[in-house]
Amino acid sequence: MNVEHENSSGNVFADLGLPNSEQELVKAELTIQIYKLIKERDLTQAEAAKILKTTQAQVSALMRCKPTSVSVARLMKFLTVLGQDVEVTVRPVANRKVGKLSVVVQSAA
């Protein structure tokens, strides 16, 4: 059996040809971290909404990994409210003409 496949670029949003694929990947990665923190603390959506100063509906969307109406900046603010440091690093690109967005998550030691 011969199965055809394509190698992933590492960004499913780009692979699907969606606009703003790098931003969508960053939002997805930040959302996953928020999801994990809410689950670790065993918070209800209502409790999380109160802590994050947002609505339960917004938290529900985050918990379903659908942060469609939330900006990257707001997701970063949510992470800081949940006790995380968020660091943005800007540096020159190497061997490319266009930069990229990425998220690096460090676990607590």
Image (tube, rainbow, N blue to C red):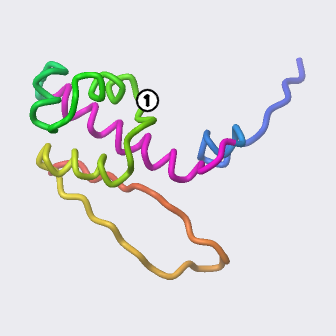
Magenta span main SS? helix
Q: How many marks?
A: 1
Q: Which residue is mark 1?
A: 66
Residue 95 figure quarter: bottom right
Q: In front: 45, or 86?
A: 45
Image-based side of 84 in relation to 22, left or right: left
Where in the figure is residue 10, as x and y percent of width and height?
60, 47
Q: Residues within 10 Å of mark 1 (few under 14, many from 20)?
A: some
Identity of the residue drawn at 14% across and 43% down: 82
Q: In front: 98, or 61?
A: 61
Identity of the residue drawn at 45% across and 35% down: 68
Identity of the residue drawn at 14% across and 21% down: 46
Answer above or below: position of 21 versus 51: below
Q: In front: 105, or 56?
A: 56
Is residue 79 one of those drawn in magenta?
no
Residue 52 figure quarter: top left
Identity of the residue drawn at 55% across and 64% down: 100
Image-based side of 106 in relation to 25, left or right: left
Answer above or below: position of 16 versus 98: above
Answer above or below: position of 38 versus 72: above
Stretch in magenta:
18-40
Q: Secondary structure at mark 1?
A: loop
Where in the figure is residue 81, as x and y percent of width and height?
13, 47
Q: Amino acid at mark 1?
A: Lys
Q: Which quarter of the figure is the N terminus placed in?
A: top right
